[in-house]
Image: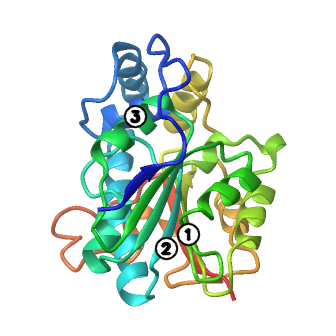
Amino acid sequence: MTHDSQDEPGRRNLDTSVPHSARVWNYWLGGKDNYPPDRAAGDHFIATFPSIVEIARQSRLLLGRVVRHLARDEGVRQFLDIGTGLPTVDNTHELAQRVAPDARIVYVDNDPLVLTHARALLTSTPEGRTSYVDADLRDPAQIVQKAAQTLDFDKPIALMLMGILGHIPDEAQPHAIVRNLMDALPSGSFLSIWDGVNVITGEALEAAQEDYNEGDADPYFLRSPEEITQFFDGLELLDPGVVTISHWRPAPDAEERGNLREVDALCGVARKP
């Protein structure tokens, strides 16, 4: 089993007095790695927009479908998962190494709690490797430099930005950040994104998000479908293109399980030519 951390988790002070997006998300998923301020922020959001719990659930199902497709059907053996959040059931490395035991995964996050739990809970197959980088998405050069200690940047890599780009405001140039990351990856690599939009439920989500952003948690900025699609400029989108997360290659029994409901989150997966 190869499992390492390139940074000492928890070296920054862990502030549990204010909500953190990773812990709020963990709460919505039914996890236990959260604190009263996280639960209060999560409950307040649910009161205005109850469907956020469905978005959280659908996002986990999507992660499974994307990683399995990339590892099984596209032959990807390297994954760079930025903004991974707190470990839960079927994390990226578990999904990928179930298909390909020799897969290598680098997780990137900047929350001390996330990294502490990653070190304690995430493991790897003997053939593969997992690594954890303490870095911010706003610094793609640092991410690439540290990830290169584990991943071979001469071979295809799947860049996973799942529910994280909404935390980057427009003034921080999120599209440029994604371009810089993809520029560092070789031909045959993949970009996978999902993020929140406000096109289905309208004002309820917008009101809940604005209220959330006015609190102490990291703000999250909803984008239009056109803005989400722009992240894939210059890449080859896989079918079915940019769609609501429940409709990206759903499982055959998705409809009978009630998993085809449209939610305010879009996703896409694209290949670098």
Asked whether the beta carbons under mark 2 and mark 1 sit within 8 Å of each other, the answer is yes
Disc 2 residue crowd, few under 14, some 14–19, many 20+, Cα 10 Å: many
- Where disc 3 sits, the SS reads helix
Alpha carbon separation for disc pair 3 and 1: 22 Å
Q: Is residue 266 left or right of residue 170?
A: left
Q: Position of residue 123 (x, y in %)?
A: 29, 55
Asked whether the beta carbons under mark 3 and mark 1 sit within 8 Å of each other, the answer is no
Q: Which amino acid, by three-letter code, is at mark 2?
A: Gln
Quarter of the figure with the C terminus: bottom right
60, 245: nearer the viewer:
60
Identity of the residue furthest to the top in this view: 17
Q: Which badge, 2 or 1, comes first in the chain's sequence?
A: 2
47, 36: nearer the viewer:
36
Quickly name the residue at label 3.
116
User: What is the count of numbered marks?
Assistant: 3
Asked whether the beta carbons under mark 2 and mark 3 sit within 8 Å of each other, the answer is no
Q: Position of residue 36 (x, y in %)?
A: 34, 14
The residue at 38%/49% (across/down) is: 55
Picture layout, residue 102 above or below residue 122:
below
Q: Is residue 42 left or right of residue 139?
A: left
The residue at 48%/19% (across/down) is: 14
Quickly name the residue at label 2.
78
Q: Which amino acid, by three-letter code, is at mark 1?
A: Leu
Alpha carbon separation for disc pair 2 and 3: 23 Å
The residue at 34%/71% (across/down) is: 96
87, 239: nearer the viewer:
87
**Image quadrant in which you'd find residue 242:** bottom right
